[in-house]
Image (tube, grey):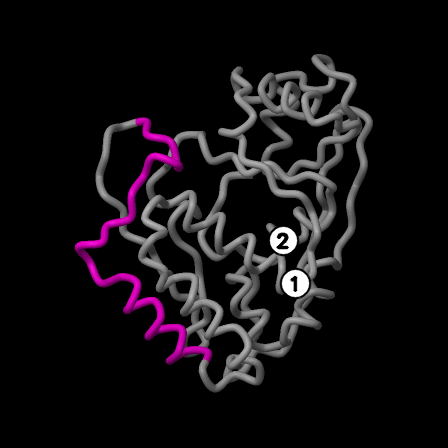
Amino acid sequence: MQPTYLPWAGYFNLIASVEVFVLLDDVQYERGTWHNRNRILMQGQPHWVTVPVVRGHLGDAINQVQTDEKLPWRKKHISLLRQVYGKHPFGGQVVPSCERLIGNEALRVLARLNETIIEAFCEKLAIKTRLVRSSDLGIGGQRSERLARMCEHLGCDEYLSTPGAAEYLAADRFTEMTKVRLSISGYQPDTYEQHGADGFVSHLSIIDIVANLGWDDASAYVRRGSIKSRESMGEA
């Protein structure tokens, strides 16, 4: 998976469900995606927090994209998180962690910023999965071919994918190009009580979950859900 900014629970569920998780840091950066933004709950409504990036050359990889330090986005994000989650039941657990991570001005490459946040949250959520950067593997190829090579290189016997990738994996005939078994994550987030909200809003940043549940219950929360194993995409 690409390293995304302040990911949601399903991202951490995927990490917790495998032995090795590959951070695809050398794939193309896409504007207006989870690469540099995510959602928090503000006054009962989902609100985007976005990391501004320096406009580079078309086709730059995530690990080539620089955050725009001419803009005070770090202070704004930290201030917003204090405002939104400071009075939540467990805001005191998660907001200081976010302040340290987001406030680290040494993290000026988008991929490194996201990876550092992901690693820190994994530690707090007691997720012991080995994290690997795709750029460190030196494996080429396109789409499913590259995924298959990575799995084989890492000695994997199973590849766990998100439902959103099922269509292109089927189109590429992933199961025909490798002996690696294909499984699709069936994670479905449960509802939880959101402080100050009238109704439940799903698919927010992990920050919302920790601020409402605390690290221990958030750790259990991200592990809920089911994994639907499929020997071939024809069984989908």
Q: How many callouts does the rendering have? A: 2
Q: In this view, does 172 lie above or below 124?
A: above
Q: Which mark is residue 12?
A: 2
**In the drawing, what numbered circle is on residue 125?**
1
Q: Is residue 205 magenta?
A: no
Image check: 159 left or right of 32?
right
Give x and y (percent) for residue 61: 38, 31
Q: Which of 159 and 235 is in front in this view?
A: 159
Question: Vertical placement of 111 versus 134: above or below?
Answer: below
Q: Which mark is residue 156?
A: none
Mark 1: secondary structure: loop
| Point 52% across, 29% down: residue | 136
Q: Residue 31's spot in the image, x, y percent?
A: 33, 41
How packed mark 2 is, by other alpha carbons closer than 10 Å (few <14, some 14-19, many 20 or more), is many
Magenta highlight on residue 79: yes
- 199 up-or-down from 206: above or below: below
Look at discs 2 and 1 and give the one toward the viewer: 1
Q: Residue at x 73, y 43 (%)?
A: 18
Sequence-wise first label, 2 or 1: 2
Residue drawn at x 71%, y 36% as measured from the top left = 160
Which three-letter amino acid code belongs to the residue tagged 2?
A: Phe
Are the residues at dot 2 and dot 1 in contact (C-beta closer than 8 Å)? yes
Report the amino acid beneath label 1.
Leu
Q: Tell me which residue sits at (69%, 27%) in the image.
A: 154
Residue 3 sits above or below residue 202 on the image: above
Q: Position of residue 191 (x, y in %)?
A: 66, 69
Q: What stretch is highlighted in magenta?
A: 59-85
**Residue 57 placement, left or right of 182:** left
